Amino acid sequence: MNKSYALSQLNKMVRDAIDMQLPDEYWVEAELSECREHNGHCYLELIEKDEHTNTPVARASAKCWRQTWLMVKPYFERTTGEPLRTGMKVLLKVYAQFHEAFGFSWIVTDIDPNYTLGDMARKRLEIIRQLKEEGVFDLQRELHIPLFAKRIAVISAEHAAGYGDFCRQLEDNEYGFRFEVTLFPAIMQGEQVEQSIIAALERIYALNTSFDVVVIIRGGGATADLSGFDTLALAENVAQFPLPVITGIGHERDESILDMVAHTRVKTPTAAAALLIDHLRQVLERINSAQQRISTAIFQRIANQKMRLTNLQTLLPALVQRNLAEARHRIEMLEVLLKSHDPQRLLSRGYSITLLNGRAVRDPQQLKAGDVLETRVEKGTIKSTVL
């Protein structure tokens, strides 16, 4: 009969073999298929995929115990600007551990954030390249914020401190501007960010004629959890949205892809509110300037007309006198001309005028017997009848 072993004995043999054959620590590249914290420890599921088919070719569990995790986690997040999350590629320093009761696991002693940064940068560059190839990367910059942008669609977590700050900033502006703010609630942290914001954009699109601009703001969440703003689908939706999109998602690191494709990027929700207030202030200044120019032009025209009237008042008497003198002269000339054509002057010189029915007779052939003629001379009139 073959010798049998208790399971604990067999597992101990496995542990001893692993301890003997894998006594060192190793750097391993892997993708996270699961990442969760419990009681201060971090539990990871590692996966390797075929680069051509994306099919898993290896899997393993890993653990980072509390004492190590308290040091590794903040350094990783501070360096990468991201928390460990599903889908992230990581470079882990591990050693092998086999426990008789809990089985095999890799124990994490360190994580290299620079490896993950490189992979994140590669993914970001790939998304940016694809957006540019699609011709949508700069579409938002071709839009213009309307002159009187007062109807604001806001995408934010409903009870976020940043949303409250944004609304208070708009309401308490020193110019007394009144804005109409409509909130479209969305999840602004974690793995659901992309789909939640896209869903909010779709609701706004259905009512896009009701708004002048869209503001995407985030405040009060973990500053490290910004991975949801670096996705292709979200960038495509924002880049092609028909209204100008302003982002204020509250972080100091390099721009997210969402920031890059937006019409305008500011750092915080209050800065987004200040931007909208300043936009209206500039419009008001333009209106006031135009009003001033119009008033100045009107006053100048009135002044010019007054000056013309004053000049006319001064020149009018002289012009009237000159016109009267010219009129008198014309009248005198006409009188002379009239006198020169007066028939009485001809009669006084011995001429006479023979009339028939009040019209001068120029041709005796026109007369017939019985016509009564009237001949005017200087001293009187002679009547005669044609025989």
Image (tube, grey):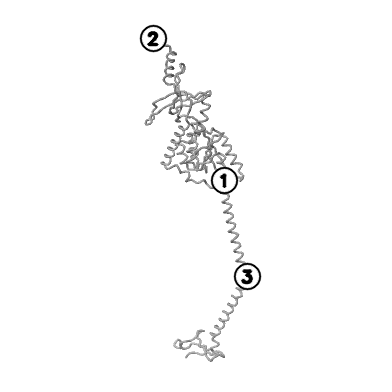
In the picture of the structure, the residue carrying the numbered disc 1 is: 278
In the picture of the structure, the residue carrying the numbered disc 3 is: 314
| Residue 73, horizontal then vertical, whole percent | 51, 28
| Residue 210, horizontal then vertical, whole percent | 52, 42
Nearest to the eye among marks 2 and 1: give it. 2
Q: Residue furthest bottom?
A: 350
Q: Nearer the viewer, residue 363 or 21?
A: 21
Real-space Cα separation, disc 2 to disc 1, in angstroms: 86 Å
Numbered disc 2: secondary structure: loop
Image check: 86 left or right of 330?
left
Q: Quadrant of residue 268?
A: top right
In the drawing, what numbered circle is on residue 3? 2
Q: Count neighbours of disc 3 (C-alpha within 10 A) and say few if under 14, some if 14 to 19, many if 20 or more.
A: few
Q: Nearer the viewer, residue 293 or 42?
A: 42
| Residue 39, horizontal then vertical, whole percent | 53, 23
The disc, 1 or 3, on the residue closer to the chain's N-terminal end is: 1
The disc, 2 or 1, on the residue closer to the chain's N-terminal end is: 2
| Residue 157, horizontal then vertical, whole percent | 54, 34
Q: Give amino acid for label 3.
A: Thr
Q: Residue at x 37, y 9 (%)?
A: 2
Real-space Cα separation, disc 1 to disc 3, in angstroms: 53 Å
In the drawing, what numbered circle is on residue 93? none
Image height of 146 relative to 340, above or below:
above
The disc, 3 or 2, on the residue closer to the chain's N-terminal end is: 2
Image height of 70 relative to 266, above or below:
above
Q: Nearer the viewer, residue 314 or 115?
A: 115
Q: Count neighbours of disc 2 (C-alpha within 10 A) and say few if under 14, some if 14 to 19, many if 20 or more.
A: few
